[in-house]
Amino acid sequence: MTEEKIYLYPVWIRLWHLLNAILCLILIITGISMQFSNPKFPMIRFDVAVSVHNIVGIILCVNYLLFFLGNITTHNGKYYKLIFPGLFSRLITQFRYYTRGLFKGEAAPYPLNSERKFNPLQQVTYVGSMYVLFPIIMITGWALMYPEVIPARFVWSSGLHLTDLFHITAAFLVSLFMFIHIYFCTIGKTPLSNFLSMIDGYHESH
Ligand code: HEM
């Protein structure tokens, strides 16, 4: 291995991530099909979309457990610990790099190494998706599968309506994250090198 290659993605992360990406894609497709269901032009037959969405959602929760337990029991969890002092200015520095420095060929302000697997923007968006949005999606998803547990009214609204609103808003944000995430993954040593990292586990520095 050359010195610029660091082993950052252990096998369990790669397996979790591959399954997670496939499951998210199926959930997005079946979710959109249910949201815009039209009996005359069914993208996917409604009852089929519901069953697939429910089963894939349950598998996603089991897979999330792997991610959660893996991050508690291995050193991978340390990369998800946000250090709040100075975080805002680190985010701005990284943002300036992505919007200007990168195009001028400047060096990355937070190069990755075994102590810092994510740059500040990656870290915040990964923590936000995995520890905020995913739990919201999973809890509201289970509640929508067993709607009898949802209170009929919650403050000003129907409990069911509010649960659904949280579910689809968080799901929309994860879908948005996924598009942006894939774009940013092309910013590596070569446009494909970050994708290869998730196959062989080695990150290649610029
Ligand atoms: C087809 C879809 C996807 C592709 C091609 C993809 C690609 C990648 C690549 C290349 C990396 C390694 C580079 C990096 O650290 O940024 C990565 C890491 C990561 N991705 Fe994705 N991704 C996809 C979907 C998702 C989804 C749906 C989520 C969750 C909502 C997600 C969450 C993560 C996280 C948390 C990491 C860091 C994992 C760790 O090392 O602890 N990805 N992804």
Image (cartoon, grey):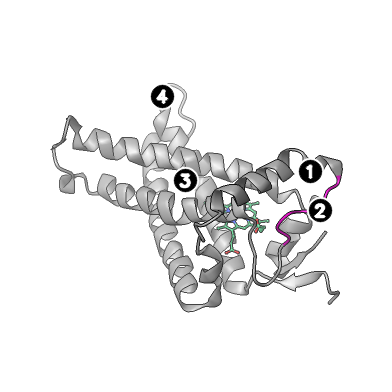
Three-letter amino acid code of the residue under disc 3: Leu
**Picture coordinates of residue 109 (x, y %)?**
73, 54
Which residue position holds label 3? 27
Marker disc for residue 107: 2
Residue 37, above or below 176: above
Mark 4–mark 2 Cα distance, whole angstroms, equals 51 Å
Three-letter amino acid code of the residue under disc 2: Ala
**SS category of the residue bearing label 3:** helix
Residues marked 2 and 1 touching at CB (< 8 Å): yes
Which residue position holds label 1? 101
Q: Quadrant of the C terminus?
A: bottom right
Mark 2–mark 1 Cα distance, whole angstroms, equals 8 Å
Could you tell whether 203 is left or right of 56 in the image?
right
- Residue 79 visible, this orientation: yes
Could you tell whether 23 is left or right of 94 in the image?
left
Which residue position holds label 4? 38
**Picture coordinates of residue 79 (x, y %)?**
56, 66
Residues marked 1 and 4 touching at CB (< 8 Å): no
**SS category of the residue bearing label 1:** helix
Residue range (magenta): 105-111
Three-letter amino acid code of the residue under disc 4: Asn
